[in-house]
Amino acid sequence: MNTPAATPPVTPAATTAPPAGEPLGPRRRWTILAVCALSMFLVGLDTTIVNVALPEIGRGLGVDTRGLEWIVDAYTVVLAGFLVVSGALADRFGRRRVFRCGLVVFGLASLACALAPSLGLLVAARAVQGIGASMLSPVALAIVVNAMPDPRERARAIGIWASVFGLSMAAGPVTGGALVEAFGWRSVFWVNAPVIGTALVLVAVFVPESRGGRARRLDPAGQVLLTLALGVTVAVLIEAPRIGWTSPLTLAGCAVAAASTAAFVLVELRRPEPLMDLGLFRRPVFTMAVLGAVAVFVALNVSLLLTTLYLQHSRGWTPLAAGAATLPMALGATLCAPRAGSLTGRVGPRRPLLIAGAFTAAGGLCLVNLDQDTGLPQLLTAYLLIGIGFGFANAPLTNTAVSGLPPARAGVAGAITSTARQLGAAVGIAVAGALVAHVSDDRLAQASRPGWLLVTCCGLFLLLVARASRTAAPRTPSPRPA
């Protein structure tokens, strides 16, 4: 998901790190990977586990499709908005410290979600959950990158990391369906508690402290503008189909989104240490990798939401059956992500990206003519193809993005890629929801067809990313001067 040629030495922690200058042993390095992967599994799971529970949440709280979109996107928008600053805080104050803080915030917010009596409180708790998750995603990648000094070993490790993350994203509907069927929709949040407790213990015992080579100044203006731009953009996508694309409120939202985006660019270009180094986007390979990450997660989240609503509303399936139908997607993502990491380490990103684009486009094409009676073999084949595409995409995209930044900025490197992912997830949910909102159950299949065409287009875009990656310079850019 190539990697920096070298990483900064791991800063020793008081009780867990080896003596200064002593490298971590193989067992310790792979244990650190396992601990980070466990936490990343949780972040990915909560991005998608709620999808299959949405119809039950809607019935339980009396919420329509528009409100259900906010339950998902409150998490993804906040997660996307805070990822970069969380990576910078981790580089400055210590990655393990921020990682543990994120676990605590995530756990407490999960309990609040499980107890929420209304839509407003559930959406608010999901937003706080997104803040906690933002302290986990980029920091986990930074910890793994710092623990793996050998580029080939690091490529394999990130491939495994991507496999776990991909599994969590794709397995969310399966897990959620089983939990909803057995214990009700609130159980999809209760399940986080034992995982959080286990992760806190393992991090304290095995993960050493590390920091960036030089503390960076914080950028509160950039953070506010980035969060505002993301939030308002997604809000317009969710609410405009209901209030009208030409309504004064929608036009005002578009103006605010455009103004905040322009202001963010101006602020970042003038800061000596910006929240997001926009100069990196002058490198075509880096830009295409980030856009590719957006496209992959648009495709995945459009697929998951449309599948959930179609199978439960239009076909009358139970949450467990609807979740089980996505098992081929989870299987494809899990089996292919490690292969993608290994392939990227050996031959570069182009080949796995070509595979990812071809399979994703093929999966979308399978369902562009979806109707009420589409056969189960066709559905399962489409989900398998999309899962394979997702599995092959993450490793080359993430490795390419990490390679585009100085090693000491590993936290920010992971944060930019993760921001692109979550932006794609939020946009995918908003677009899919807009397609089927206020559509009767018997017309839902026909209304969802543009969504599957969008999935196909995302796959075709990955082919363009693969073409661009062929000209990638295999080097890491020098750090910005102080």
Image (cartoon, helix red, strand yellow):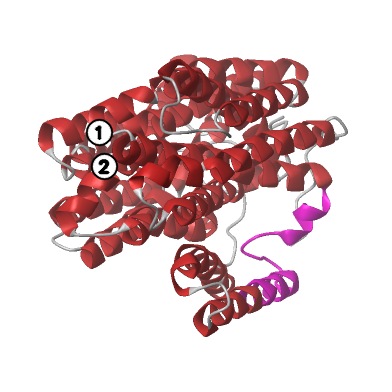
Location of residue 176 (image quadrant): top left
- Name which residue type carries label 1: Pro
Identify residue for label 1: 319
Give the vertical position of 279 relative to 258 (above or below): above
| Residue 220 located within the stretch drawn in magenta | no
Q: Is residue 96 visible?
A: no
Residue 126 vs residue 376: left or right? Answer: left
Give the vertical position of 49 relative to 389 (above or below): below
Magenta stretch: dominant secondary structure:
helix
- Quarter in which the N terminus is drawn: top right
Give the vertical position of 38 relative to 119 (above or below): above
Q: Nearer the viewer, residue 331 or 148?
A: 331
- Name which residue type carries label 2: Ala
Labels 1 and 2 touching (C-beta < 8 A): yes
Identify residue for label 2: 53
At 15% across and 53% down in the image, what residue appears? 60
Could you say where residue 46 lies in the image, as x and y percent from the top left? Answer: 34, 42
| Residue 265 located within the stretch drawn in magenta | yes
Q: Is residue 417 visible?
A: yes
Q: Residues within 10 Å of mark 2 (few under 14, many from 20)?
A: many
Could you say where residue 203 lies in the image, as x and y percent from the top left? Answer: 33, 35
Mark 2 falls on what kind of element? Answer: helix
Residue 290 vs residue 348: left or right? Answer: left
The stretch in magenta equals 260-283
Residue 59 vs residue 156: left or right? Answer: left
Could you say where residue 429 lies in the image, as x and y percent from the top left? Answer: 46, 50
